Image (spheres, rainbow, N blue to C red):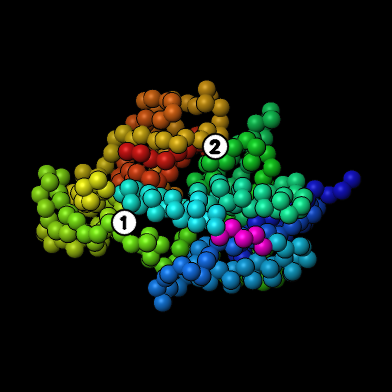
Amino acid sequence: MSKETVAIGLSGGVDSAVAAALLLEAGYQLIGVTMRIWDDSYKFSDTLPAGNACFGPDEGEDIEDARQVARHLDIPFHLVDLRQQYQEIVLDYFKREYRRGRTPNPCIRCNYHLKFNAILQALSNQGVHWDYFATGHYVRQRRHNQQYSLLRGKDKNKDQSYFLYTLDQKRLSRTLFPLGELTKPEVREYARKLNLPVRNKDESQDFYAGDYTELLDGGSGPGPIVDSSGRELGQHRGIENYTIGQRRGLGLAVGKPLYVKRIDAAENRIVVAEKQELFSAKMTVEQLNWLTPIDAVPDQFEVKIRYRHRAAPARVLKLGEELKLQFVEPQLSVTPGQAAVFYHDELVLGGGIINC
């Protein structure tokens, strides 16, 4: 019987490299695959900040690192051109959301549409056979009675389940996550032991290393900054430069700290308030995806409203196409456009996009 073939997404970083090495040790036949998403026609500042990012003009270095990893592990390497799909699916969405006064998470959208879909479709179109897809995400997976579950990674500081709530049963059944039971220090140590070419490479910190407003093709233009009563306090530089909870960069001198409370795209204005006004007791979530059967969703579970947010308990007020939740304790800076991901202990129940 032939070995099962795994297409491993190689990002050029240490995590995916170690994931590939672990799969080889487990006896799988591997194919390395990397996507090209950067187009040199994009405009960006002459000097980008130090640090790696998923999307940027230094993509060629990451592609070469991924190629070196494949060569080191002696596995085939495929480069898939997804520049057009990234523009249409990720960047255009990113721009639309900011124009609406919302704060999107492009990494979640990229994972669902490109990494777990377009990249695999491209391989199949090229006649490349694969049985499973694998990534270097720090998440775990469980199968029980033909039902697949997604769980937090063992390393609580690196757990990336927040970014993968959009997966479904079909994708989970054909995906492997070799790093789920490991910590980042263990992964680094394994990379050094195998002398992997990327063993000392810094990890990506964000989806774009520069100022994200460079990707927005211009902005809304200046408009008023007002307090909760509507009194004008100053002028903003365009609503796309702000997000809920922001304090720095407001350019206000009113004798007390003020934060962005609401972004009113229709009126092109920013509403600011003192910190205590930024707490929300209720939240509505749309574009839902459930990883657990909807009839098994409990009446109360924990919710993360940002990647680094500590999951907070909330009660279900209404369960339907939209989900209405009430937090047990009000939460700071609930931000439309961000993902809300639902947990029951280690289990990912599902998630959606915060509407209000």
Q: Quadrant of the C terminus?
A: top left
Question: Residue drawn 26% across and 42% down?
Answer: 279
Q: Residues within 10 Å of mark 1 (few under 14, many from 20)?
A: many
Say which element carries label 2: strand
Quarter where residue 68 is shown: bottom right
Quarter where residue 22 is shown: bottom right
**173 relative position to 222: left or right:** right
Say which amino acid is labelled 2: Leu
Main secondary structure along the magenta-highlighted residues = strand
**289 relative position to 314: left or right:** right
Say which element carries label 1: helix
- Residue 330, image x, y percentages: 30, 38
User: Magenta region: which residues?
Assistant: 79-83
Q: Mark 2 points at which residue?
A: 347
**257 relative position to 170: left or right:** left
For marks 2 and 1, give the CA distance. 34 Å
Say which amino acid is labelled 1: Glu
Question: Residue drawn 72% across and 47% down?
Answer: 132
Q: Name the residue under label 1.
A: 240
- Judging depth in this view, the residue of 215 and 250 nearest the camera is 215
